[in-house]
């Protein structure tokens, strides 16, 4: 997962997932489960703790 | 009737005695019908005379010169007292020959982050200029692929510079090393490498379950632009910890450049606490010039202190092993019909949401991430002439066992009556869905 090019992130489905839009030459969407066994989730939480990422609340 | 003649020696003085056996049975000795001397312990037997069955050959010193030609086939059950060798499934590395590269053959313009040049092999870069990372067809004899880094913008090393390849291992796959016990075993990592210049790289091993306990050793590339096989013996670690679970138990990394944060120390050739400055203590310094390239393949991790021949596995085997961590659900570029690439069945969950399901080829290691390219009309739900098009897919909260994925598309649809069945597919070239459960 290309963490450096995350354009937006928001919680979905009662906060069970984080839906990210990743830009760059080949944009992709990513659904990350809010589960500490998931490597991407742990990385996103590190980015939030470091102030490098804000995750929008679920609508 | 023949005569029996006993002739004494003209020179010897010893007495010849013929002794009867100590049984009550009469014995008859029939002499061979040819001239010669009877055998004793100093006699040689012509090989032509060795026929029939040898019940018990008492050979005390069998030298190689006495074994010429092919040995006969011997049943394995009759071969005993042979020292164990590292045979069979000895290689703990997945995709060590870099055959499988599901994420794409090449990534250009990398200045930071991670890229998988081959499945399970990650190129990592930080403050190290610009590189292309790719799965290369340049390889040593007996191999077809390698992980490759090619410098496209050279750089001056900063304190936080790092540049390396790495593979992470599940702890449950390394229990045979018995780390943390009195029976802890040595391991050996071997690999083929090639660089456009000479110098040393640093092999760094870390135990994730033991507060990043670490070992490092440099290996030297002696000749530029030449494939060389290297090996590093990893000491047994009675004080280490590798948990018996699906989490990260060990990492092997090949550092080819690093700044003062990760270098300037010395090789850490005994297991101990992680010391960042002991990670890159080499001299290879890939990235000092745009001419710099580095290749890696033939990676093997095995028990013992000997680097044995690489264990080659079929593409299908390696792919299945890799799919535990990353699997392509559907990729329109792999479809023979570029118009559509079927994913699976779907249904209208709501008027503005269509769910779809896909069952994996291999159960995933852990909770996984869904990745999908996005673009206009990339995805399609179709049914008897009815079509719904969308740009992106997501993963729903429901139904996510580790053996399949339940995804969705959502938008302002016409004709999406709740419960209506659809066939879900990729609609254009470039559309791709994958799941990742990497360590």
Image (cartoon, coloured by chain):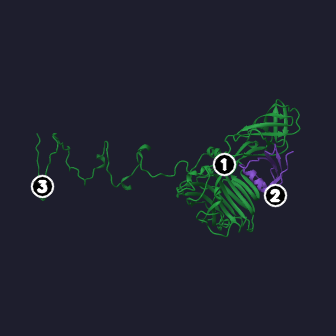
User: Residue B320: horizontal and vertical position, in percent?
Assistant: 64, 44
The mark found on residue A52 in the picture is 2
Give the class, few, some or many, for how many residues have Cα within 10 Å of label 1's Cα (few <14, many ≥20): many
Q: Can you tell which chain is drawn green?
A: B
Q: Is B416 left or right of B195, judged from the image as shown?
A: right
Which of the 4 quarters of the picture holds residue B416? top right
Foreground pick, B352 / B220: B352
Q: Nearer the viewer, mark 2 or mark 3?
A: 2
- Can I make out residue B130 in this image? yes
Give the class, few, some or many, for how many residues have Cα within 10 Å of label 2's Cα (few <14, many ≥20): few
Tell which subunit mark 3 falls on: B
Residue B64 higher or lower than B328, as above or below: below
User: Circle 2 sits in a helix, a strand or a loop, which is it?
Assistant: loop
Mark sitting earlier along the chain (1/3): 3
Spatial separation of the CA atoms under disc 2 and disc 3: 107 Å
Q: Do marks 2 and 3 share a subunit?
A: no
Which of the 4 quarters of the picture holds residue A12? top right
User: Residue B61: horizontal and vertical position, in percent?
Assistant: 34, 55
Foreground pick, B264 / B427: B264
Picture colour for chain A: purple
Q: Is B90 left or right of A59, judged from the image as shown?
A: left
Residue labelled with disc 1: B100
User: Circle 1 sits in a helix, a strand or a loop, which is it?
Assistant: loop
Spatial separation of the CA atoms under disc 1 and disc 2: 33 Å
Residue labelled with disc 3: B15
Q: Single out the residue that lies furthest toward the bottom.
A: B264
Image quarter (top left, top right, bottom left or bottom right) of the N terminus of chain B: top left
User: Residue B196: horizontal and vertical position, in percent?
Assistant: 66, 64
Give the class, few, some or many, for how many residues have Cα within 10 Å of label 3's Cα (few <14, many ≥20): few
């Amino acid at each position: 997962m290309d963490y450096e090019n995350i354009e937006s992130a928001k919680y979905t489905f009662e906060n069970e997932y984080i839906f990210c839009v990743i830009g760059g030459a080949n944009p992709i969407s990513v659904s990350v489960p809010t589960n500490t066994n998931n490597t991407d989730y742990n990385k996103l939480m590190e980015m939030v703790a470091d102030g490098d990422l804000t995750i929008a609340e679920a609508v | 009737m023949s005569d029996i003649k006993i002739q004494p020696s003209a020179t010897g003085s010893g007495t010849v005695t013929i002794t009867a056996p100590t049984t009550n049975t009469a014995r008859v000795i029939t002499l061979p019908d040819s001239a010669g001397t009877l055998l004793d312990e100093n006699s040689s037997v012509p090989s032509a005379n060795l026929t029939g069955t040898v019940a018990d050959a008492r050979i005390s010193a069998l030298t190689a010169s006495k074994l010429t030609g092919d040995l006969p086939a011997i049943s394995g059950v009759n071969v005993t007292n042979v020292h164990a060798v590292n045979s069979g499934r000895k290689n703990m590395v997945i995709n060590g020959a870099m055959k499988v590269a599901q994420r794409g053959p090449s990534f250009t313009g990398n200045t930071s982050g991670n890229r998988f040049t081959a499945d399970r092999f990650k190129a990592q870069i930080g403050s190290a200029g610009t590189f292309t990372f790719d799965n290369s067809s340049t390889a040593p004899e007996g191999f077809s692929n390698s992980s490759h880094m090619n410098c496209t913008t050279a750089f001056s090393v900063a304190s936080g510079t790092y540049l390396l390849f790495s593979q992470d291992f599940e702890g449950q796959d390394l229990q045979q090393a018995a780390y943390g016990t009195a029976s802890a075993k040595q391991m050996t990592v071997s690999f083929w490498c090639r660089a456009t210049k000479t110098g040393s790289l640093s092999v760094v091993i870390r135990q994730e379950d033991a507060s990043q306990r670490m070992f490092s050793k440099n290996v030297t590339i002696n000749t530029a632009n030449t494939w060389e096989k290297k090996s590093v013996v990893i000491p047994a670690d009675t004080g280490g910890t590798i948990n018996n679970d699906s989490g990260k138990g060990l990492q092997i990394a090949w550092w080819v450049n690093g700044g003062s944060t990760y270098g300037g120390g010395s090789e850490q050739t005994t297991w101990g606490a992680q010391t960042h400055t002991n990670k890159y203590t080499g001299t290879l310094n890939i990235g000092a010039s745009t001419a710099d390239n580095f290749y890696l393949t033939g990676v093997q991790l095995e028990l013992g202190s000997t680097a044995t021949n690489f264990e080659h596995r079929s593409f299908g085997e390696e792919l299945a092993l890799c799919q535990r961590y990353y699997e392509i659900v559907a990729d329109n570029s792999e479809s023979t019909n570029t118009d559509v690439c079927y994913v699976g069945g779907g249904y209208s969950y709501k008027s503005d949401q269509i769910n779809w399901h896909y069952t994996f080829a291999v159960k995933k290691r852990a909770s996984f991430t869904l990745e999908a390219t996005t673009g206009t009309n990339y995805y399609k739900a179709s049914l008897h002439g009815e079509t719904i098009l969308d740009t992106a897919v997501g993963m729903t909260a429901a139904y996510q066992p580790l053996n399949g994925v339940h995804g969705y598309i959502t938008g302002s649809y016409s004709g999406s009556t709740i419960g209506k069945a659809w066939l879900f597919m990729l609609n254009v070239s470039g559309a791709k869905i994958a799941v990742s459960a990497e360590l």
